[in-house]
Amino acid sequence: MSTMLRINRDKCGYCGTCVAVCPEDALELIDAYLSLERECIACGICARACPLGALEVVHEE
Amino acid sequence: MKNNYDILVIGGGPAGALAAKTAAKAGNSVCLIEKRPAIGTPVRCAEGIGKELLKEYIKPDPRWISADIESARIIAPNGTAIRLDQDRAGSEVGYVLDRKVFDRELVWQAAEAGADVIVKTRATAPIMENGAVRGAKVLSAGTPADIRAEVVIAADGTEAQFARRAGLDTTVPLREMMSCAQYLMTDIDIDAGSTDFYLGNEIAPEGYLWVFPKGDRTANVGIGITGRKSRDGSRAKDYLDRFVAKSFPDGKTIEAIAGGVPVCRPLACTVGDGLLVAGDAARVVDPITGGGIGNAMYTGRLAGEVASKCIEAGNCSKEALMPYDTEWRASRMGMTIERNYKVKEYFITLDDTKLNTLADSIASISFSEFSVAALIRELIKRNPKMLLELKALKDTLA
């Protein structure tokens, strides 16, 4: 089973709150979209901080 | 695109604009890059600023002032309102800005002073040589380039990735990240001359909800809550939607934005070899109000001044740039942030019952001064039974 971060681009407000709390510098706000640019440890801190609920740590078989 | 400047500024907000303008006026070649395709948008701000603070940097202009505020109200969980009036408080209350126009004016002034401005250009990494910052690797509308500079001023806002990639720890702890959402609403019944701050753990845990007028029947209605209380069903947007449904059910939302406001202490160090960090990226936000525009302009201007001096002296080492860090920490801004950080740490421990008690104790007072210090002095004076508990608060004034 693996865990990964899912970005819901329809919910995302492109505000960068997640970027500032990411302990791995994995997220990047590029113009008008959020991108997972580097290795994510699926800690879920960004998903907590998001004002809109656009991020989710998902577990896949 | 030119590839060599005296000073490279990352970010076209108030900190970057003031840094670029100051440095260009001092005779330096300056380049300001902004990753967005347009300066000033999207707005990530409640747009309030104190009048006197603003005037230190720019002459007020109706083109970018949405509302002139005469009073402020702090509303306790039980509805008790503490009112602070301008006629009793001088002209210190504030303006609500139109950041889309305001930010453009500031960058316009930087350009007029001689700075190059390039939009849709993102710094991907610092150019490092022997541990020193020597410019930035950028992507300019998709095209990679190197921009070299003697000093880089990182004014890249909440994300603060440039300084992080140059080796400074800019990560904001979850509990100290205010998770924010805001609607620009119209057709709502408000007092167009009053900024309203709603407190309480039910309404905005460890933060507040604001109604900042933008004109008649129009306002920024927004909220910030601590990241640690943010989860599915109780996010900033959920709290805001509940308030709006109750208070402005017939209002129309013409803009919906989100944002993160760091209310941690400022960075432990805001300089490096060839690097200065200013504004929200330096975490110089007021921890009580979440206000950052004035502090961004102050640190941006100071960064531009110190960088200019160091370039003239031919030494842009960390040691040579250190007066920037020392000066803002010792400034009124630096002292206020430190005090308000402690005040914030006290206030977030209060439950709604205690917030109500405190609010009730000072609700009938005419404040002669519009400041956190004046509020604290009255709270201590009027709540002798809570003396022990208020000691932490009293110590912040020492």
Image (cartoon, rainbow, N blue to C red):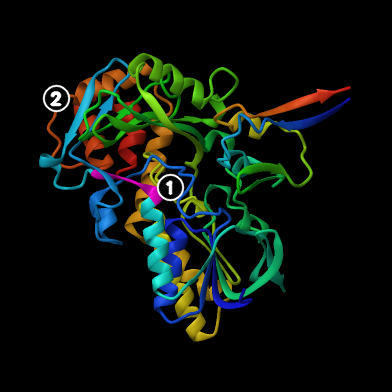
- Drawn side of residue B331 relative to residue B51, left or right: right
Q: Amino acid at mark 1?
A: Val
Bounds of the magenta segment: B94-100
- Looking at the image, residue B202 sits to the left or right of residue B360; the answer is right
* Residue B134 shows in the view: yes
Taking the spot 77% from the left edge, 25% from the top edge, the residue there is A58
Res B131 seen here: no
Describe the element under mark 1 as helix, strand or loop. loop
* Screen quadrant of the N terminus of chain B: bottom right
Q: Which residue is mark 1?
A: B285
Residue density around tag 1, few if under 14, some if 14–19, many if 20 or more, within 10 Å? many
* First in residue order: circle 1 vs circle 2: 1
Give the alpha-carbon distance from disc 1 to disc 2, as whole Å: 30 Å
Whether residue B93 sits left or right of residue A25 in the image: it is: left
Work out whether residue B95 or residue B387 is closer to the camera in this orientation and state it: B95
Q: Which residue is mark 2?
A: B364
Q: Position of residue B172 (x, y in %)?
A: 57, 43
Q: Residue at x 35, y 54 (%)?
A: B333
